[in-house]
Image: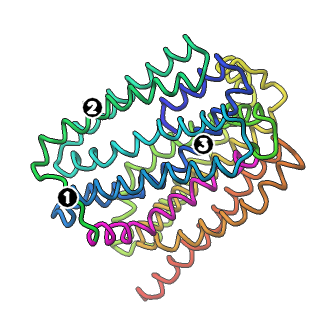
Amino acid sequence: MSLSTLLLTMIVTRVTGEITAGIFVYAFTLAQQLQSVGYYEVRPYQSTDLQETYSFSTYLSARIVTCTAMMVICLVIIAFRENSLYNNLVIFLVCFYKMFDTAEDVYHGLFQQQGRLDVAGKAMFFRVLTSTLAFLAALYLTKDLVVTTTIAIAVAAVGFLLFDVLVSRQFVKEKYSFQFIPLRRLLITCFPLFIGAFLLLYIYNAPKYALSDYMPPEYLTYFNALFILTYIINLFSGFVLKPILNTLADSWLNREFKRFSGIILKLSLALVGFTVLVIAAGYFMGLPVLSWLYSLDLSPYRTELIVLLAGGGLSAISVVLYYAATVMRKQKWTLFIYIAVSVAAMIVSPMAVQKMGLLGASLIYLALMVFMTLLFICMNAYFIHKAKQEAG
C-alpha cells in the first residue's frame, strides 16, 4: 500500500465517518486487486527488454487490453453485488481512478527501458501529488465520495496526459500500430506472473472481502485501521532484504548451501525480533495512536491488533522465502503455493468472519500467513536438499 493510499483512507475515515469509509476501503481493496489485472506483471518484462523484442506499440496495446479487462471485471462484480446505486458508483469510480496507476505504468516501463528511471519517478510523483491533493480538497469541500472521486479522476487524466503521454514522445518516434500476434505472445509470456500476483493479492485481501460480505461497513474500516501497522514490518523487511540479495545469489551460485541457508535464517530471525518489538509497541501505544489518526474508538480491538501484527511478521518472512526461491530459480513453484493458500482462504474466511467477526478476520489472516510460510519452508528445504545431493 502506497503512502498516498494510506493518506486517502485515513482522511476519508476522519471526514466521512466509519460507515462511509468502510465502503471506500472496500472499493480501494477491490481496485488494488483489479490493478493486478491492469498491470498483468508486464512491467518487469518490459523494463528489462533492452533488445526491444516487443515494440512499445505492443506493450501499449497490452496495457489497453488489460486496463479494459480491469474495468469490465469491475462492472461484472458490481452487477453481482447487492449494493445501493451510490455504493456501486463509488466502487466503479475508485477503480477507474486507480486505473490511471496501471495506465501510466507502461510509460514508466518505457522510460526505465531507455535508462531514464528518473523521468518515471518525476512523472509518478507529480501525477499522484496533483490527483491526491485534488481528492483531499474536494473531499473537505463536498464530503461526497462520488463528487470527490470524479474530480480526482479528471485531475489524474490531465496529469497522465501531461506527465506521461506527452513526455513519452521524446522517447518513441514510431506511430502506434496494433499487431495481434506479438500482443498475444506477450500476454501468454506474462500470464504465469500475472496469476501469481493476482492470487497473492487475493490471499492478503480475503479477510477484507469476507468482512465486506458478512459484516457492516464499519468493521472493514476498523480492520483497515488496525492493519496499517503491519506495513511497518513490511518496510523493515524491504530495508534488510534488498541490500543482501546479491550476497544471497552469490552464495547459491557458488554452491555455498550452508551460507545460503544461514542468510535466510538470519533474515528470518531479524524479522521475528523486529516483529516482537512492533507487537510490544503496538500493545501499549498502537491503539491510542491509531484511534487518534483515524478518529475511531479502536480500544476494544487490542487482541485483533496483536494477531494482525503477528501475521504481518510471518508475511514478511514469506517474502524472504519467496526471494530465496527466486534466487534458486524455482519461482514457478510458488504459483502452487499461492493456489493452495488461495483455496484455503476462499473456504475458511467466510466461516471465520461469520462466527467471530473482526477477530475471525484477524485470525484468518494469521492462519493464512502461517500456512503460506510453512509451504515456503518445505519447498525451499526440499530444493536446497536436492541441490546438495546433486552437488555431491
Could you tell me which residue is drawn at 53 percent across and 58 percent down? Answer: 198
Q: Is residue 262 left or right of residue 212?
A: left
Q: Earlier in the sequence, mark 3 or mark 1?
A: 3
Q: Nearer the viewer, residue 139 or 45?
A: 139
Total marks placed: 3
Residue 177's disc is 1
* Circle 3/circle 1 CB separation < 8 Å: no
Residue placed most toward the observer, 91 or 132: 91
Secondary structure found at label 3: helix
Report if residue 207 lies within the magenta region.
yes
What amino acid type is highlighted by mark number 1?
Ser
At 51% across and 16% down in the image, what residue appears?
138
Looking at the picture, does residue 215 appear above or below residue 248? above
**In terms of secondary structure, where does tag 1 sit?**
loop
Residue under label 2, please give it. 122
Mark with earlier residue (2, 3): 3
Viewer can see residue 122: yes
Between label 1 and label 2, give the one nearer the viewer.
Answer: 1
Q: Identify the residue position indicated by label 3 in the image.
A: 29
> What amino acid is labelled 3 in the image?
Thr
For residue 297, side relative to residue 24 (left or right) = right
- Above or below 389: residue 68: above
Q: Find the distance from the CA under tag 3 to the CA under tag 1.
A: 34 Å
Q: Tell me how the rendering is colored.
A: rainbow
Q: Is residue 277 visible?
A: no
Residue range highlighted in magenta: 181-210
Percent across and percent down for residue 125 are: 33, 30
Query: In the image, residue 380 lies at what x, y percent?
Result: 54, 71
Q: Nearer the viewer, residue 226 or 209?
A: 209
Where 44 sits versus 337, above or below?
Answer: above
Q: Quadrant of residue 91?
A: top right
| Residue 224, horizontal then vertical, whole percent | 67, 35
